[in-house]
Amino acid sequence: MSAAIEDYALISDARTGALVSRDGSIDWFCPPRFDAPSVFGALLGDEDHGHWRLAPVGGGQAQRRYESEDFTLVTLWTTDSGVVEITELMPIDGPHTHIIRRVRGISGSVELETIVRFRFDYAAALPWVRQHRDAGPPAIAAIAGPDAMLLRGVTLTARDNSHVGTFTVAEGEVRDLVLTWYPSFEPHPEMPEVDALLRRTRTWWQRWSTDLHREGPYRDEVKRSLLVLRALTHRDTGGIVAAATTSLPEQFGGTRNWDYRYVWLRDASLTLMSLIRHHHLTAARHWRSWLLRAIAGDPADVQIMYGIAGERYLPERELTTLPGYQGSGPVRVGNGAVDQFQADVIGEVIVALDDARRAGLAEEGSSWSLQRALIGRVVETVDRPDQGLWEIRGEPQRFTHSRAMIWAALDRGVRAMHEFGLDGDLEIWERLRDEVRAEIDAQGVSVGGHFTQYFGTDEVDASLLVLPQIGFCAADDPRMLATVARIEADLMRDGFLMRYRAATGVDGIDEPENPFLACSFWLVEQYARTGRRDDAVQLMDRLCALTNDLGLLSEEYDVDAGRQAGNVPQAFSHLALVRAADALADDGTIGE
């Protein structure tokens, strides 16, 4: 059975990633991109669905950590016979996809066992595996359909559709195991020079993280969160995925299992804003180029999400080859939200690009034409109800958060013209901006004085905490203070925030869910902006205590079971952590 979600570490080459359990099993790996079919799928089933385990025979005590500024995982195994250190990473190596597991003897002598089961195409294909003989170290090759893999560095023998090998490492000895994915129609790749790859990979991460030496509260949590956001950004295309996994359950035993390995315009925009505020304009330029390619064409065809290279066709389907995480099915690939209308999305994009412009990223080529066309699309759809931030599968509504993001898109367009001399339909944008604000003031505020989830209801929604972040109102606006009081009364569960009251049925799914971590981080920011610093710090400390030993967060938290829930690592959780920490630092980089 797969491990607890918080027991997994991520290793990544900023194209895809692998999840490594605390006991040394790689249970999730989708080469060569995050959204590719799995080769190791035990995360959503068991060992029969593919995994690669490396650990001392008989086990031992494991202590793990990341090297300070990258995704190199270092695990120190202490056994009765000695101590070994296993270093695991996905190197930065041109077109190739590797996993390197280096074993180094620290003291005594330790016997290790490795077991590998290849299951290609989400465990639908049992590959042909044979011994691979060349001038290099012992190896096996696995091939099925378009996929091929080489595992080098240890002699392996077949056992029940797995391959098993043992070896002993004494003090001062080093053994490298190297797994390489490649297209099956290409020749076998040469054995890479491991030391060179290690140096190149460390240099790549260190060069990117130069600006992460941040002082202030929650320094380590912020640094790791920014690194997570970089790991989820494809280094070739610039597409920023929402998470590294699919179908990890938001509610254990429920059906809220979604595929997050795609580029949501919203999530990517919010990620971009966090990176910009921490001086990563190169990431902003790269993503803006991705955006130009992805949405090129008729603005009416803009989607709320795309594939990593800008693919548009992402139909949702259920797999029969993977039973689900600890029995929580179904396992889904693709995402039906791709066909939804979410009126807030263009607002997030325009706000992020406005942040980039104000940070010094100059308009290039057709970048402003793109933004102007997007705002034009907002104008065309300004009165249309939508599925909103939470991608409800119930009836569309006029969500207050969505209406505020429409306001934000128009507002940033107007300001771009006034403050940067850019061209656009100023009169129309100004008129609609003011009309949308007046509409929210009239229909999005309850008789009790708080903002509402959507027009015509008295319910609240955690997304309302975003309104001060985009400058729609001040954090201490009486309506916001009333909203916070109502959110605390209705949505707080065991110290953390729910997105909304699922019992209302607005989302069209008749199931409960767990607190959504980003919402609680938004509340930290709101507290910090309104002088409730003690409350902000207490909540921030509770949230940071939910990270695993490596600083990783999933999407939600099951307060009853005391465990992480949902896809992992989740960009939304980590970018919200960064915002909350910045607000507590009171460094003036957040807010309007």
Image (cartoon, rainbow, N blue to C red):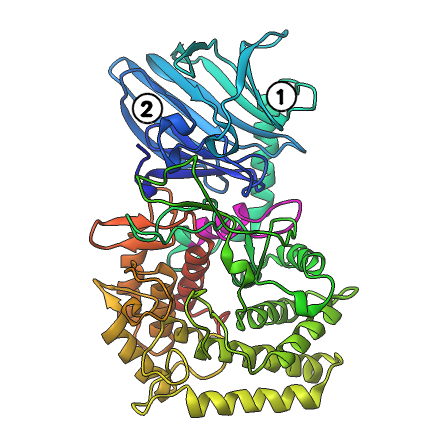
Question: For the view shown, which residue lies furthest in the right direction?
Answer: 365
Residue 355 in percent (x, y) is at: 60, 69
Please say whether residue 233 is one of the residues in the magenta stretch.
yes
SS for callout 1: loop
Which of the two marks, 2 or 1, is nearer to us in this view?
1
Decide which of 285, 344 is in the foreground and name it: 344
358 lies left or right of 167: right
Q: Residues within 10 Å of mark 2 (few under 14, many from 20)?
A: many
Give the residue at x 47% y 15%: 174
Compare residues 168 and 199 and report the one nearer the observer.
Answer: 168
At mark 2, the secondary structure is: strand
Residues in magenta? 222-242
Position of residue 322 relative to residue 352, above or below, is above
Q: Is residue 324 visible?
A: yes
Tag shown at residue 192: 1
Residue type (three-letter) at the residue carrying disc 1: Pro
Question: What residue appears at the point 35 percent right and 59 percent down from the top-left corner?
Answer: 517
Please state the total of marks drawn on the protein image.
2
